[in-house]
Structure formats: structure tokens, C-alpha cells
Image: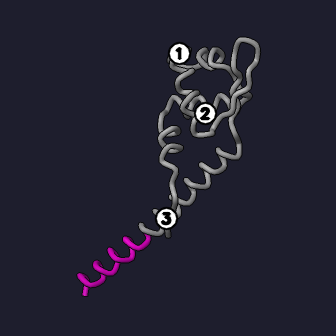
Amino acid sequence: MSTTVDDALWSAVGDPTRRRMLDLLLAGGGTATTLSEHLPVTRQAVAKHLGVLHRVGLVHVTPSGRERRYEVDEAQLARAVAQLSSVGAAWDARLQRIKRIAEAIQRGQES
């Protein structure tokens, strides 16, 4: 079973602050300023994290006056979820093979 993983995408969601930002954005979008009110980092740090999420396509941005409003790109998020499911299925299959091998070894030792 071969799985293509987008390393940039997983690097982006690997950061706990960015995952929390995605949660907040899924609840209704926001700006760097509004997000910084809910996170233990500065507005500047939020803006940098949003830049990472934007580069991998997980959020899209719309100018709104002096601010920029961010929203989750649901298609890209669905792609990330599909990748995670695929990787999970591959590891489940590997672990099942390891379990069968271990059980065969144990049966051989009991004989």
C-alpha cells in the first residue's frame, strides 16, 4: 500500500498552535488580531503561523479593511484528512502483519 504524503502540509499541521488556529477558524474565520486574543502568542506570531497555513493552502485570505480575514479551505482540509486516513490504514495493515508474525512465533514456541 503506497501513500503519498504532502510533507509541507503535515509540517504545517504538526504545530499545536496552528492546529488550535484551524479549530478557531473553523468556528467562523477570523483575523490575526482576533485569533491572537485566543492564543498564547503575539499577533505577529499569529500572522506568521497564518502565512504558513496559507502557503500550504489550508486557509484562504480576503482583505477586509485594514485587516485580512482568514478562513479554512475545506477542500484542502479534506485532502489532509484523507491523507491521514490513508496513512492510518497503511499502519493498521503493517501492525496486523506484525501481530500475525508474533502469534506464529508464539505458537511455534509453545509446541
Main secondary structure of the magenta stretch: helix
Q: Earlier in the sequence, mark 3 or mark 1?
A: 1
Cα–Cα span, label 2 and label 3:
28 Å
Task: Note whether 107 is above or below 68 in the view shown.
Answer: below
Q: Do labels 3 and 1 touch, CB within 8 Å? A: no
For residue 56: magenta? Answer: no
SS at mark 1?
helix
Name which residue type carries label 2: His
Q: Which residues, given as a range, are shown in magenta?
A: 96-111
Q: Which residue lies under the disc numbered 3?
A: 90
Q: Where's residue 63, x and y in %?
A: 73, 21
Name which residue type carries label 3: Ala
Q: Earlier in the sequence, mark 2 or mark 3?
A: 2
Give the camera-side residue of 54 and 22: 54
Q: Where's residue 34, x and y in %?
A: 66, 16
Q: Say the numbered circle drawn on residue 44.
A: 1
Q: Do labels 2 and 3 touch, CB within 8 Å? A: no
